[in-house]
Image (tube, helix red, strand yellow):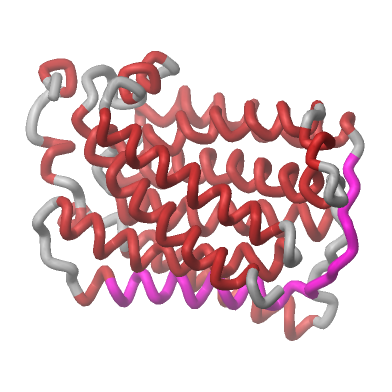
Amino acid sequence: MLWAVPVAVVGAFSLALGSALQERDAVRAPGERVAHAPFLLHLFGRPRWLAGGALVVLGAGLHLTALSGAPLTVIQPLGVTGLLFAIVLWSAFTHRAVSIHQIVAGIAVMSGLTGVLWLFPHVDDAPVMDTGTALLLAGSVTCAGVLLHLAARWFPGSVRAIVLALAGGAAMGTTSGLARVVLAGTNGDWSRLISWLTLLAAGTAVFGALLVQNAYRSGHFAAAYATLLVTDPVVGVGIGAVMLGEGAPEAPLARISALLFALLAIAGTFGLARNRDRNPEAAASPRSARTR
């Protein structure tokens, strides 16, 4: 477990840097406020977005590597360190000073999420999930995501960022849960990566990416990234606790504490959704006129 911890932290920084790079092109891309699949094809033609994507893939790979050496409930909380990385990087890229408000809200999110996840028991048992259960899980998350994607265009920018990142984070958390099962089942035989669960995890990840890029597109990067960081590990740990036998808090005090920590994380997320923290490019002109 000792090597898995620094790997997870480096992965969190890589994810933050890649996401901050991708946000710039997601905001500038032409199209509707909430874009469909061709939106991703446009972004694939942008070198900076591809560089950001490479860093996100690297970060995700490091995260999954860390998962192979430690339980989900240990590795997932380390991902929250990426929020402060993301806030500082986004501020540097948009030439906006980091405010005390952003730092305080970011710390609230990190503290709340870390508190929630560390209250869950940590186990080392190899998880198992049958294909039918995995299909039901991924299908439910995908259907909910489609509904939120269709409804998001009617929401104001800050709410749209949170709603889309919520759906995208759920898809990414599902991907993490499925990946945990796949990686634990290899037992050193990497040919076992070729399976239906792997394909299902990849498909869920692509759908989650579409939702997340649309969340960044709103211009409220800090709120979107905070929501992603909260939802992804909470869903992942929830899958671990309910479906993979990794357990949940049993004592009443632990459950109450988890609820209070969750409220702290939610409050910090909404605190990051203020209009003054929005990327000015997101409201500068109609996206249909933007071709950079």
Q: Nearer the viewer, residue 233 or 152?
A: 233
Q: Residue at x 64, y 52 (%)?
A: 64
Against 209, is 122 above or below? below
Against 41, is 174 above or below? below
Q: Nearer the viewer, residue 109 or 193?
A: 193
Indicate whether residue 284 is drawn in magenta: no
Residue 176 in the figure: left or right of residue 223 = right
Residue 94 in the figure: left or right of residue 247 = left
Find residue 124 and report its horizontal and vertical position in percent: 85, 68
**Where is the C terminus found, in terms of image quarters?**
top left
Q: Nearer the viewer, residue 142 or 20?
A: 20
**Where is the N terminus found, in terms of image quarters?**
bottom right
Against 4, is 253 above or below? below
Furthest toward the bottom, the residue is: 253
Against 171, is 85 above or below? below
Residue 247 in the figure: left or right of residue 219 = right
Find residue 30 and report its horizontal and vertical position in percent: 22, 20
Indicate whether residue 123 is drawn in magenta: yes
- Look at the image and give the residue range highlighted in magenta: 103-129
Q: Residue at x 64, y 72 (%)?
A: 3
Task: Place residue 169 in its image quadrant.
Answer: top right
Q: Residue at x 83, y 50 (%)?
A: 188
Residue 69 in the figure: left or right of residue 166 = right
Q: Residue at x 42, y 67 (%)?
A: 267
Task: Please tell me how many numbered marks the rendered image carries.
Answer: 0
Task: Place residue 200 in its image quadrant.
Answer: top right
Find residue 121 and report its horizontal and vertical position in percent: 79, 74
Find residue 255 and report its horizontal and vertical position in percent: 73, 76
